[in-house]
Amino acid sequence: MADKNKEWVDYKEVKEKVTMQMVLDRYNIKLHPVGDELRGACPIHKGTGKQFSVNVKKNAFQCFYAGCKAKGNVLDFLAAMEHCTVRDAALKLAKWFQVGELVEPSDAREGVIALLGKTEIAGGFMPDLMPTAAQLDEMIAWYEQKNEELNKALTINWRTLTTLRILKAKK
């Protein structure tokens, strides 16, 4: 990984793409819906009352406990939870939720076709054109890399699931 002081982070994109609900889910924090808000114990100061509030529409949070008073956006929340800078929080969120790094599924198919060349015909392999052991090693390495990249696309499913949970909580 590159030196984190030199890594570019788009704060605006992170705030737009990562919701408070996604981060709460990552920490397994359960809050109760009240209108457009979620309320419960503050995870920052480990409170036990219902002083903590998340405004889902504004993607912001606030703790009303006098000894805490934490408030802000998703970056501020993670910075408070992880005891780190807002920059480090943005980098963590970008990494956790693969902000700006999604790989299109069509890229994988094109890569397989390029690696296989003309060895694949009508869904099967022609025995006399089977890849060599070295080509198979290259294909395996490529698949392992693409598998890792494609797993990043699951972030989309995570966002959808989070949205559905919010909608269900409002019912």
Image: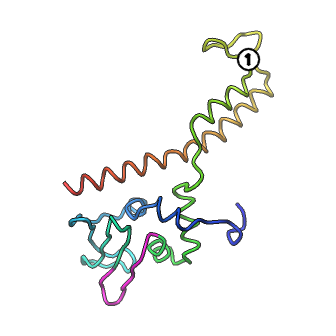
**Residue type at numbered disc 1:** Lys
- Identified at 79% across, 25% down, the residue is 133
Q: What secondary structure is marked by label 1?
A: loop
Q: Is residue 104 left or right of residue 69?
A: right
Magenta highlight on residue 81: no
Q: Nearer the viewer, residue 67 or 170?
A: 170
Residue of label 1: 118
Q: Residue 84: x percent and y percent?
A: 55, 77
Q: Residue 33: x percent and y percent?
A: 23, 64
| Residue stretch rendered in magenta on the structure | 63-74
Query: Where is 100 relative to 85, above or below?
Result: above
Query: Where is 107 relative to 169, above or below?
Result: above
Query: Where is 36 relative to 86, above or below?
Result: above
Q: Residue 106: x percent and y percent?
A: 59, 34
- Identified at 66% across, 41% down, the residue is 145
Q: Nearer the viewer, residue 132 or 166?
A: 166
- Identified at 24% across, 78% down, the residue is 49
If the image is split into quadrants, where does the N terminus sit?
A: bottom right
Dividing the picture into quarters, in which one does residue 55 lie? bottom left
Classify mark 1: residues with Cα within 10 Å, few (<14), some (14-19) or many (20+). Answer: few
